[in-house]
């Protein structure tokens, strides 16, 4: 599947913090704050109410009471790589919120499908009825 390019997020809506990361990196992890915590002020985006609701649902536990989405990236050893990953994940999240779900088109089963289902039920019923106790008359 091709990777979708989302539009960049406005810089004034973002806040970056650098944390000491865990994981690979040896002593470098103890010395350098390479993990990135990216906060997006959702109200600064001025989203449509439907998009806002979808974003809130998609963000889940990453949504704060202040209306921010927090994404933490710590998989890479460098700040730049973690920063790029966090921005990419955040842009993807906002982009997915802009995609409206497709409407479900109601359908009905055909007469043949209904008849086939009933026949299968009757067949199964006959199999189960044949499993009863054997009576010796």
Image: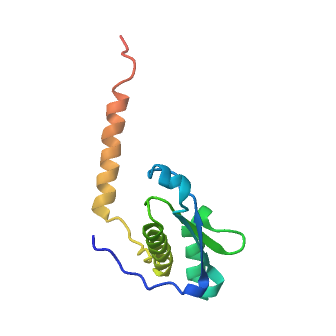
- Report x, y in % for residue 84: 44, 73
Residue drawn at 41 percent across, 82 percent down? 6
81 or 101: which is nearer to us?
Answer: 81
- Note whether 69 is above or below 29 in the view shown: below
- Report x, y in % for residue 11: 55, 85
46 or 16: which is nearer to us?
Answer: 16
Q: Is residue 47 visible?
A: no
Instruction: State which quadrant residue 132 falls in.
Output: top left
Residue drawn at 30 percent across, 48 percent down? 119
- Looking at the image, which residue sits at the far top? 136
Q: How is the image coloured?
A: rainbow
Q: Is residue 129 left or right of residue 30?
A: left
- Note whether 125 is above or below 70 in the view shown: above
- Report x, y in % for residue 23: 48, 50
Q: Is residue 113 visible?
A: yes
- The N terminus appears in which quarter of the rendering? bottom left
Residue drawn at 44 percent across, 64 percent down? 78
Instruction: State which quadrant residue 134 falls in.
Output: top left
- Note whether 135 is above or below 73 in the view shown: above
137 or 76: which is nearer to us?
Answer: 76
């Amino acid at each position: 599947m091709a990777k979708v390019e989302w539009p960049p997020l406005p810089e004034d809506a973002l806040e970056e913090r650098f944390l000491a990361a865990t994981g690979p990196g040896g002593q470098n992890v103890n010395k350098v704050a390479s993990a990135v915590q990216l906060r997006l002020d959702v109200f600064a985006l001025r989203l449509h109410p439907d998009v806002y609701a979808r974003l809130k649902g998609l963000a889940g536990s990453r949504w704060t009471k202040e209306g921010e989405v927090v994404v933490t990236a710590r998989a890479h050893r460098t700040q730049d790589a973690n920063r790029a990953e966090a921005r990419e994940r955040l842009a993807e999240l906002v982009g997915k919120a802009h995609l409206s779900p497709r409407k479900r088109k109601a359908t009905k089963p055909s007469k043949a499908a209904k008849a086939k289902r009933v026949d299968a039920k009757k067949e199964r019923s006959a199999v189960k009825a044949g499993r009863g106790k054997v009576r010796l008359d």
